[in-house]
Image: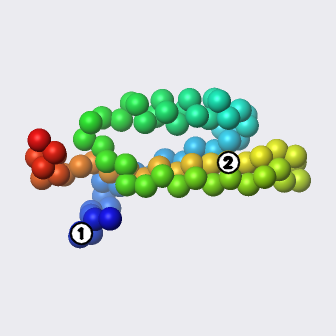
């Protein structure tokens, strides 16, 4: 957890859903991993929220993932060096 609040202007939320990938778990995982790999080195992942619900009325499992990220500050990047 951060010691002080961060600016929301650099925060991004990306949501992946099973319906985007035609309920194929392998394609879903590849989509999430592909997005993560394309992020620049100065991006910080703040949280990953997963949601799963078993087969509903349509007989299919539903799952989703929200990734909350932001650009690291210059100060944070200097601390990593």
Secondary structure, mark 2, is strand
Which residue lies at the image location 52% right of the left edge and 51% below the top edge? Answer: 66
Image coordinates for residue 33, horizontal then vertical, percent: 49, 33
| Up/down of 14 relative to 36, above or below | below
Which residue lies at the image location 30% right of the left edge and 53% below the top edge? Answer: 10
Extreme residue in the bottom direction? 4
Q: Is residue 74 visible?
A: no
**Real-space Cα distance between discs 1 and 2?**
32 Å
Q: Label 2 belongs to which residue?
A: 63
Q: Determine which of the numbered discs, if any, sits on residue 36 in the image.
A: none
Secondary structure, mark 1, is loop
Q: Is residue 51 visible?
A: yes
Q: Label 1 belongs to which residue?
A: 3
* Left or right: residue 38 compared with residue 59: left
Which residue lies at the image location 30% right of the left edge and 43% below the top edge? Answer: 43
Image coordinates for residue 49, horizontal then vertical, percent: 53, 55
Q: What is the quadrant of the C terminus in the image?
A: top left
Image coordinates for residue 44, horizontal then vertical, percent: 31, 48
* Left or right: residue 21 compared with residue 4: right
* Residue nearest the viewer, comparing 13 with 61: 61
Q: What is the quadrant of the N terminus in the image?
A: bottom left
Residue 20: quarter of image? top right
């Amino acid at each position: 957890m951060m010691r002080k609040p961060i600016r929301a202007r650099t925060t991004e939320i990306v949501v992946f859903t099973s319906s985007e990938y035609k309920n194929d778990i392998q394609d879903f995982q590849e989509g999430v991993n592909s997005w993560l790999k394309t992020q620049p080195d100065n991006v910080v992942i703040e949280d990953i929220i997963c949601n799963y619900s078993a087969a509903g009325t349509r007989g299919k499992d539903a799952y989703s993932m929200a990734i909350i990220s932001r650009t690291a500050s210059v100060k944070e990047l200097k601390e990593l060096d």
